[in-house]
Amino acid sequence: MGAVCCRPQPIDFDGDVNLFHFVLLRCVGKGAFGKVRVVQHKQTRNLYALKYINKAKCVKMKAVANIIQERRLLEEIDHAFVVNMRYAFQDDENCFFVLDLMLGGDLRFHLDRLGSLPEETVRFYMAELSSALAYLHDHRIIHRDLKPDNILLDEQGHAHLTDFNIAVHYTEHKQLTGVAGSMAYMAPEILAKRGYTFNIDWWSLGVCAYELIFGRRPFRGKTNSDLTYSIAKDPLRFPEDAESRCTRAGIQALRGFLERDPAKRMGWSPNEGMGALRRHAWFESIDWETLEDKKQTSPFIPDSKKANFDASHELEELLLEDNPLKARQRKVQDITSLSAEMRQMEEQFTPYDFKKMQRRSYYPQNQQLVSTATSSSGPASSRPVTPMTIANDGTQEDYALKHRGRSYDGYDVDVPATPVTPVNPQMNQYVSEKDI
């Protein structure tokens, strides 16, 4: 009798995606409102990264708008060098993002371990990330938080951009003025509050390239004021041994990315695309035609026999978790009895399944663009997940949620324009959005 009553309920894979569709594996990351763990889809056997965010904490910290904005923006994009969303859903306690699994760790992890990376490796990553940024900017999206922490490697060592929590759509008709991002990687026009657009991502990419090659950032300061002054005024200097670590073409490329005049900065442009960047001498070894197919071998391949993330997350999950994650049936509830914030999540954090739904944009100016890009491939046109084996260790996608002052649908959130307490005072994360 006991065996009958304890028999598991059959899983409806034809219905909306939910946590019952996945096997929960190891925890590999921790953020402000939840964690990241490896999961396996029970039907397809594919591995993914599951990022889950506690809804009560989101409401308490007035971050509901962030979650909905990120969810909607990720439904719009699908690119070879982006950590793409494959599924989204919620239960009574959490909102879930199911993302491409990156087994190679983030570049901050590898930079801390190695001190710096060879120029050849950095150039390869910059080419892949340039392709991702060009795709985003072509879809009128600015990432605004590009840094080594948000660049993840797959098993083969290809770079992918992640964490779209403060990404935002832009328009050619109005520049943004809100201060948002990680301070050490902010472009000077953000800190000057004189208005900015997509060009800021290329500055951040330049800071990343410089830091990866030389093991230090180009602009530094002991205080926020000193750092702001350095970014705005200090000349771009290189270490004494720069010539032994970077070619002349590489230094020229760094100067191009770190050009203070946005109009002269190297990167994608609406008129020429990536033409000028691709023609630059530093990228002459890159085969741009096959880059996005990932047919080129990365100069650096992470060691699959080692954990490329902080292993303490798994130990913490085992020893300290009071309410471990598990699949639970949703309770029947009257949505009108919920708080405005909880109701907003119920109504707007809608399920997404990349095998059943086309990519689309909630941003009016982008709807035709996304429709054109996906209509020829059908509902299951999203890029397939890179094949992986379950024996390898997982990814680290730390979910450091930043406050913003506006949701996509115009819900105003009263958020003070103060920095989040950082691990490194030179990497303060600011968000102050009042005019987007």
Image (cartoon, rainbow, N blue to C red):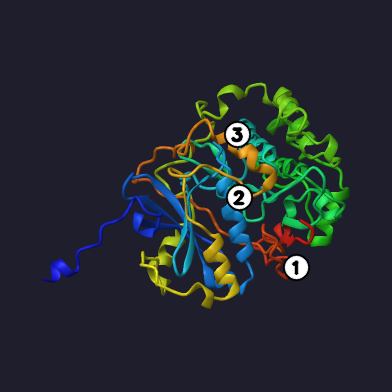
CB under 8 Å between callouts 2 and 1?
A: no
- Alpha carbons under labels 3 and 1: distance apart: 40 Å
Q: Upstream in the sequence, badge 2 or badge 1? A: 2
Q: Quadrant of residue 68?
A: bottom right
Disc ID at residue 228: none
Disc ID at residue 418: 1
Query: Residue drawn 64% across and 39% down?
Result: 368
Structural crowding at the residue carrying mark 2, measured as other residues with C-alpha within 10 Å and reported as few (<14), some (14–19) or many (≥20)? many
Element carrying mark 2: helix
Q: Upstream in the sequence, badge 3 or badge 2? A: 2
- Alpha carbons under labels 2 and 1: distance apart: 25 Å
| Disc 3 residue type (three-letter) | Thr
Which of the two discs, 3 and 2, sits closer to the camera? Answer: 3
Which of the two discs, 2 and 1, sits closer to the camera? Answer: 2
Q: Which residue is mark 2?
A: 73
Q: Which residue is mark 3?
A: 372
